Amino acid sequence: MIARGQVTAAGRGSHGIAARAPRGASVRTRAVAVSAVERPPRVVLDDLPIVYAYDHCPYCVRVRLGLGLKNVKHEVVFMANDDVKKPTGLIGKKIAPIFEIPDEKLIMGESMDIVKKVDAEDKYGATGFFADATDRKDIKAWMKSVKDLLRLLHRPRYMSASLPEFQQKDSRDYFVSGHPVPPFDKPEWKAAEFGQEARDKAYAEAMAKTPELIGELNTALVELEKLIYSDVSCSEVGLGYDDIDLWSRLRSVTLVEGAEFQPKTLAYLNNLSEAGDVPLYFGMKC
């Protein structure tokens, strides 16, 4: 039996181990990926750290992925998107992610600061696990080039997918009211005369544009393939903060029906999903 608080070798991965392909594929892909990301020894603290999150949120995914890749057992609490009371009670305002460390009586709210803390303290396993960020200007330029495109594709799909933070209409309405789809900007979107009915119509129109947008997305994915170094890291330095950021942003693209990921990109997505224990959306794409 493994005592709580003990660092163990359970859960260690190895090069060349086939990733699991779940039968139902609720949010994971059915495709079998070969995981080349070796997981470090399992870390189980006496008091598990808690991540308060929204499933769709890339900043929340950064923290979940960082903990998962370091093989740190943790609790994930999904908050309703319209829940203001819980995050405000924890950290003073409505934000996500929120990281609670019970044994330190500490609450944190900045995603990369959380990952850096986990990677700097030996209670979470070996330190310096993640390579430093390399300021990939090419990847940043790519992300900027697809920002409006992805907003048109992602945001309506978040409302259609069965994500935990959007289980009730109030939560969906709250998200829609604060997240415009192009060509609208935030001031006109939130104007009093632009009500919920108009916002819902804009979301429906964005979803209906998928056939004309999917070609643009797939062209962009061909370009992305050239920027990713390998199927286990986007940069030559190896698995690191570049991946914590990029993978967390790419995850939502797996929700888009018709998205054609190139081979290296697809393997990259699957490998880090498996090693980091953060599911992709292939099984619920729409």
Image: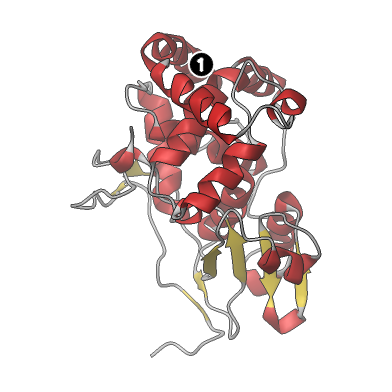
Q: How far across and how far down the image is residue 173, in percent? A: 55, 44
Looking at the image, residue 261 sits to the left or right of residue 221; the answer is left
Q: Can residue 57 be seen here?
A: no
Which residue ends up furthest to the right in the rendered image?
Answer: 92
The image quarter containing residue 189 is top right
Looking at the image, is 30 positioned above or below residue 79? Answer: above
Q: How far across and how far down the image is residue 234, in percent? A: 56, 31
Q: Can residue 17 be seen here?
A: yes
Which residue ends up furthest to the left in the rendered image?
Answer: 23
**Residue sitting at x 38%, y 54%:** 14
* Quadrant for the C terminus in the image: top left
Looking at the image, is 238 positioned above or below residue 126? Answer: above
Q: How is the image coloured?
A: secondary structure
**Residue sitting at x 45%, y 45%:** 272
* Quadrant for the N terminus in the image: bottom left
**Residue sitting at x 39%, y 29%:** 256
Q: How far across and how far down the image is residue 98, in percent? A: 68, 62
Q: Nearer the viewer, residue 180 or 150?
A: 180
Q: How far across and how far down the image is residue 156, in percent? A: 47, 32
Q: Nearer the viewer, residue 73 or 184?
A: 184
Looking at the image, residue 164 sits to the left or right of residue 124; the answer is left
Q: Label 1, on which residue?
A: 226
The image quarter containing residue 267 is top left
**Residue sitting at x 51%, y 62%:** 40
Looking at the image, residue 225 sits to the left or right of residue 196; the answer is left
Q: Nearer the viewer, residue 33 or 160?
A: 160
Looking at the image, is 149 positioned above or below residue 2? Answer: above
Kind of element beneath mark 1: helix
Amino acid type at image mark 1: Lys
Q: Residues within 10 Å of mark 1 (few under 14, many from 20)?
A: few
Looking at the image, is 249 positioned above or below residue 265? Answer: below
Q: Nearer the viewer, residue 256 or 32?
A: 256
